[in-house]
Amino acid sequence: MTANSPNSGEDRSSLWKPNRQASRRVEMLVKLIFGAFALVSVATTAGIVLTLIFETIEFFGEVSLLQFLFDPQWTPLFSNQQFGIHVLISATIMTTGIAILVALPLGLMAAIYLSEYASLNTRRFLKPALEILAGIPSVVFGYFALLTVTPVLQTFIPGLQGFNALSAGLVLGISILPLVASLSEDAIYAVPRSLRDGSYALGATKRETIISVILPAALSGIVASLILAISRAIGETMIVTLAAGQNPTPGFNPFVPVATMTAFIVQVSLGDTPATSLAYKTIFAVGMTLFLITLTLNLISFWFVRKFQEKYE
Amino acid sequence: MVSEMQSSMTTDTVFTVRNLSVYYGSLLAVRGVNLDIPKNQITAFIGPSGCGKSTVLRCFNRTNDLIPGARIEGKIEYHDQDLYSKKTDPIDIRRRIGMVFQKPNPFPKSIYNNVAYGARINGYQGNMDELVERSLKGAALWDEVKDKLKESGLSLSGGQQQRLCIARAIAVQPEVILMDEPCSALDPISTLKIEELMNDLKQNYTIVIVTHNMQQATRVSDITAFFNAEESLESSNKIGFLVEYDLTQNIFHNPQNKDTKNYVSGRFG
């Protein structure tokens, strides 16, 4: 102890020569380096958005907004070009809608089970298992939909075609299930214990506590996870391209081949469409539409969480 | 002293605790507690941290059951009912024995629904508006919130939130209210309001309060139980036990036990 005491005799100040000048320079350098890396991601995003904007402006130089919104068909690759984006949007809505119908109830119930009912050991095993599901490549899900789910569905849905929105949507739902379950579980698990205790102390059962206290308290997080899942489903490409087909069909028939926005972009990007042609510029207009939809969803999610998130100490 | 104690005990006994020990897993937390809680009185549990006073309190409405691994030995009777018998439904017990917690924990619902929630889940068939008003009046909160019943319970101040939690507890018309350090998160003025409220509530309810604050025990309680803790021989945890149990004035002015005397005179704890 005496060796460390400041009064141990010898003049200790001579042993302490911090180089404040040098450390300040290093701090500054480190800050610059990290700042530069942070800037890379911002710059990349800005670059992508700018490219989208410029190409989209060029596209609308040749095709009017009215055509884009109201043409009855989507045939930019044919000689009789029509640009009714709703044909692609309806396919995206269909696959996404079916996916959410699968993922929301299953994901939410899984989340409630994991957070409220599962024992510590079950939870310790199940949660990583669920997250492994999230690690399966989407191309595998796509083949699974095309080669397994569709034939099974065809045994009891006679009119179902080889490519269809139903099968793609169902498997898309399975693929986003871990996202919904994991994020909802985080939100439910984060509800303070004191609220559960308060409810039980009034003579509430577990079910009443979950439905009337825990879920409302976790609502903002659950909605945020749902919106993130919708964004993911809208942007998902591989499953819908493989299983729903690439055939732009207007309307909402889940049994026939359709082309989602993402599937169309893949089709044009993979094909030999010349980079200067109007058909090629179309994919940027579609990409822009996709971007605007997900941006809107993210803004809604941001607003919702801000407005409805309960602050607990 | 003893005769005085007994004379005040001629009223009904609500809880009879016999040789109660509480375990968390294999760890003994509280050993061998014997005491009686009289009806329409305020009983205070005091003692240093880790002496098991909150643990014993939580046994009365079986909220310890919610902690995995918690179990008891010995017996607690609520009137003539064995609280821990297999036939006893903890859900039913908790409706009759309400609880107010250390930190105010209103639900993220409107003020109205915070109060109505307990009544609803327990199948209350009467006029809900009246019940909410009566409960909020009973918790001395009505005048402050009657114009904003639709606002969130979380928008209230800490002291108001705690009184909302009291209103919520009395809305299900319990017989007993357990209070686990209900004022420890509150400022002195809010604390005073809650203490006054407890005095009113005593007419209709039996109250058991855990408090760290000895002045609070002398101000509000009729009877005081002093708990202490000893180091466990086998493990590093503390084991709580009941030292002395008497009329509050005796505990503070004429304690029989040396440790009680040292504690109430502020020498430790």
Image (cartoon, helix red, strand yellow):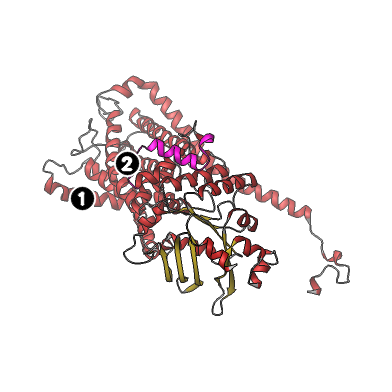
Q: Position of residue A215 (x, y in %)?
A: 39, 46
| Disc 2 element | loop
Q: Pointer 1: residues within 10 angstroms few (<14), some, or many (20+)?
A: some
Task: Assess whether residue B138 is covered by the magenta stretch.
Answer: yes
Chain at tag 2: B
Q: Toward which corner of the image does residue B214 lie, by quadrant?
A: bottom right
Q: Nearer the viewer, mark 2 or mark 1?
A: 2
- For disc 1, the chain is A
Q: Is residue A138 above or below residue B225?
A: above
Would you say A181 lies left or right of B154 here? Answer: left
Magenta stretch secondary structure, dominant: helix
Secondary structure category for the residue under label 1: helix
Image point 27% across, 35% down: which residue?
A91
Q: Residues within 10 Å of mark 2 (few under 14, many from 20)?
A: few
Q: Position of residue A97 (x, y in %)?
A: 29, 39
Residue denoted by label 1 = A149
- Residue type marked 2: Gln
Which contiguous range is marked in magenta?
B122-144
* Residue B50 visible in the displayed image: no
Q: Quadrant of residue A294?
A: top left
Q: Residue sitting at 88 percent across and 71 percent down? A: A10
